[in-house]
Image: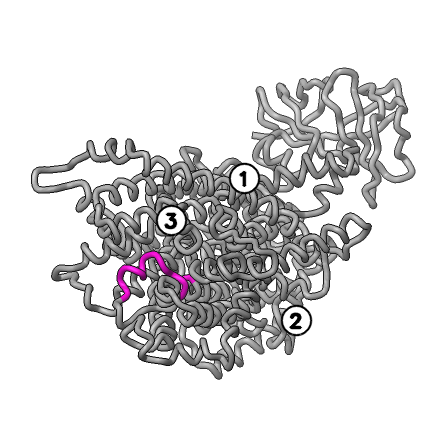
Amino acid sequence: MAGPVVFFALFFAYPVVAIVGRGLKDGDGWHLARIGQVLAESGVRHVLWFTTWQALVSTALTLLVALPGAYVFARLDFPGKQVLRAVVTVPFVLPTVVVGTAFLALAGRGGLLDEVWGVRLDTTVWAILLAHVFFNYAVVVRTVGGLWAQLDPRQEEAARMLGASRAAAWRTVTLPALAPAVAAAALMVFLFTFTSFGVVQILGGPTFATLEVEIYRQTADVFDLSTAAVLTMIQFVAVGAVLAVHAWTVRRRESALRLVDASLTARQPRGAGQWALLAGVLLTVAVLLVLPLAVLVERSLDAPGFASYRALADADSGVFLVPPIEAIGTSLQYAAAATVIAVVIGGLAATALTRRDAGRLVRGFDALLMLPLGVSAVTVGFGFLIALDEPPLDLRSSWILVPLAQALVGVPFVVRTMLPVLRAVDTRLREAAAVLGASPWRVWREVDLPLVRRALLVAAGFAFAVSLGEFGATVFIARPDNPTLPVAVARLLGRPGETNYGQAMALSTILMVVCAVALLVLERLRTDRTGEF
Amino acid sequence: MLLSLRGATVRFGGRAVLDAVDLDVAEHEIVCVLGPSGSGKSTLLRVVAGLQEPDAGAVLLAGRDQAGVPAHRREVGLMFQDHQLFPQRDVGGNVAFGLRARGVPRAEQGERVRELLELVGLPGAARRAVAALSGGEQQRVALARALAPRPRLLMLDEPLGQLDRSLRERLVVELRELFGRLGTTVLAVTHDQGEAFALADRVVVMREGRIAQSGTPLEVWQRPADAFVARFLGFENVVEATVTGQNADTAWGKVPVPGDAPQGARTLLVRPAGVRLVPAGEGLRCRVAARTFRGTHVAVRLQPGDAPPLEAACALRAAPEAGDEVGVEFDPDEIVVLG
């Protein structure tokens, strides 16, 4: 337990506090009046308003589009279901930068829609909303669908036998059972869209900015640290509130339901209604999830003879000190290091959280572990720079800085994946081993480890994909001669010219393929019970 | 004494689940703790195993206080209610687990596993997957696993609880024979009196964390200590009574009692066999409320006016129909005056 606590104190709380302090304190003390001043600015109020409503609309849209998908994946059997389930999950682990780029390729200037119908969405909020739906579709399908598949159909049958109509049975039995999962999924989507950075940074242009983008602008472009600090605190409070509600709904869901093996509840579609639903969901997946990625790949191949790809190996592109292709190696190394850190820290935390004698304090840590998902990654990145710059913790020049920041985002995924599995290990199994003479270490190695090995691998894969795509913090701390893939993509997009655009598409495609391969490997490993994501 | 509990007490949120329990188990003895669910039986085993720290009192194994000794150093075996076989290991891996934990050489492990699987009637099953076993086979593997490290004391938690009746009756005989042959000291808990009586040298009846009675199966069966034990053993005819000389005043009228019965306000147990049916008009007047076929006899439920109902055991042919009016007389040999 001590390990994770120290890790979070040092690499999360300390940098965040440091940057807030830097913004709100000068020689003679705190300037809390600054909070009021910042809130009074109309620009800030506009950003707050936009952040909130786009998150609400994105969440509602995602639920609307993804809930039928959740039903189809949970209760209908059709050929290619396993593959398709993996496909819809791909966007979730894709770097936000790639998502932004893909939608730019689809609906931006010179994009597919522009060429065919002359429609451009990148100047409207629709591009952002659609990208958010694209990104979070899997969250709803996984969280709600995963539970839906495991709900015992006999409960509904029991209600039917007691005289409830099909609709009444669904409303009184299935819906209440599902409601906490829907709420949890909605909250997660709200959280992700509320703190959205990469997507909005690329698609928002000068008109649209979320809190996170505004924090980045205030810190990196305007150098107004006090405004950034106040915005960080606002976001912190909002995210804390959302997480508290999320923890509560998750706890309710864990309590009362009778679950069965998911493979037993799915059936062949029957009747016109179910076939139509299946077709609709497949069409949605094709248009909304597959098309943007396909367009991305197509654009990267636009220049004849793989020119965009070959240009990546060219050292004189002028954007970087090194050929962009080297970003791949850098990214993989950083992500691997971040994965190791995240798995060790997250594994320790999850183990500590499952101990039966864990007190209230430790259980409170559960919710705290989720905070890095929502706290401004930009703040963390910038906080790293100003907090970890003096002995004994002078890490500015160390390569470990980037993996540390990335691991911070990976830990919540590791904990979320491991916790349910560790909790599912019957305590009496451990007791049986102890009574047979096994020491606590042997119990862990021989009882827990074999049962959670798969979950551990899945967690590692998620941490890897998330680290690979991390953008908000990395953009600050990655050094110019060592950019990661998402940072390189963003810089290429920031420069004018067809070659740079083509290279950005090519690099995004590479990033997408790496993430997708990582995910498809995981999909073979995972069982439906391993966690929420 | 191999095992001694001295005032062992466990409280969950203020409620005493185990309330100052004193219990001794001698070497080679088979003791069965019998009680309804929630009486603290399983907690008793967990305290001895070291899985639950007692809030007060002491656990002594071979005279040594076990306070602070963790479960894996106590050298006792515990067979869990639902077996808790390790799903990721095959049968042999499960049986050998305790041997590996104690660092027994590999060759010896293999030999012992083979020997034990033979002992429990599953020769050659070492490579089978645990998931492929039937309930009875799982139970045998769990037993072999618990026996493998030669524990000083073997504890069984509802050992046959999840098995069907005929398998249970066969296994309980096998178990008793096996433990006798190995000289194993056994402390078992169960809620099934048939199981307890068939298995144990000594039965300990528990109620709400306390020991209500302790004795050989015959003693407990013949002379239940109080109304609770009598009712728990399945006797329905328990009634408040005032004993004077050879007679007792009860809600069922005057009932004859054995000559040496203690006097004064007592509780009376009338075994079903002690309720004799006579023609209507003689003895206590009753209406037959229901009858249940029990294989060797018919259990007849009688309603004597407003008094508590009576249960009688009748031969098949002599049993009256429901709704019949009968008379009842009592046989003092089948009547016990409880403490």
Q: Residue A206 got which mark?
A: 3
Q: Are marks 3 and 2 in contact (CB under 8 Å)?
A: no
Magenta region includes residue A197: no
Please name which of the two marks, 2 or 1, marks the residue nearer to the observer: 1
Residue position marked by numbered label 1 in the rendering: B38
Taking A476 as reference, is A269 left or right?
Answer: right
At mark 1, the secondary structure is: loop
Counting from the top left corner in percent of width and height, residue A291 is at 59, 62
Q: Residue B121 got which mark?
A: 2
What is the CA distance from the residue labelled 1 to the residue labelled 3? 68 Å
Q: Is residue A33 above or below residue A210?
A: above
Going from N to C along the chain, the mark reached first, 2 or 1, is 1
Please name which of the two marks, 1 or 3, marks the residue nearer to the observer: 3
Using the rendered image, report if marks 1 and 3 lie on a common chain.
no
Tell me which chain the residue with mark 2 is part of: B
Note whether residue A413 is visible: yes
Q: Are marks 2 and 1 in contact (CB under 8 Å)?
A: no
What is the CA distance from the residue labelled 2 to the residue labelled 1? 33 Å
User: Residue most toward the top?
Assistant: B306
Magenta region includes residue A467: yes
Q: Amino acid at mark 2?
A: Gly
Q: Residue at x 62, y 19 (%)?
A: B242
Tell me which chain the residue with mark 1 is part of: B
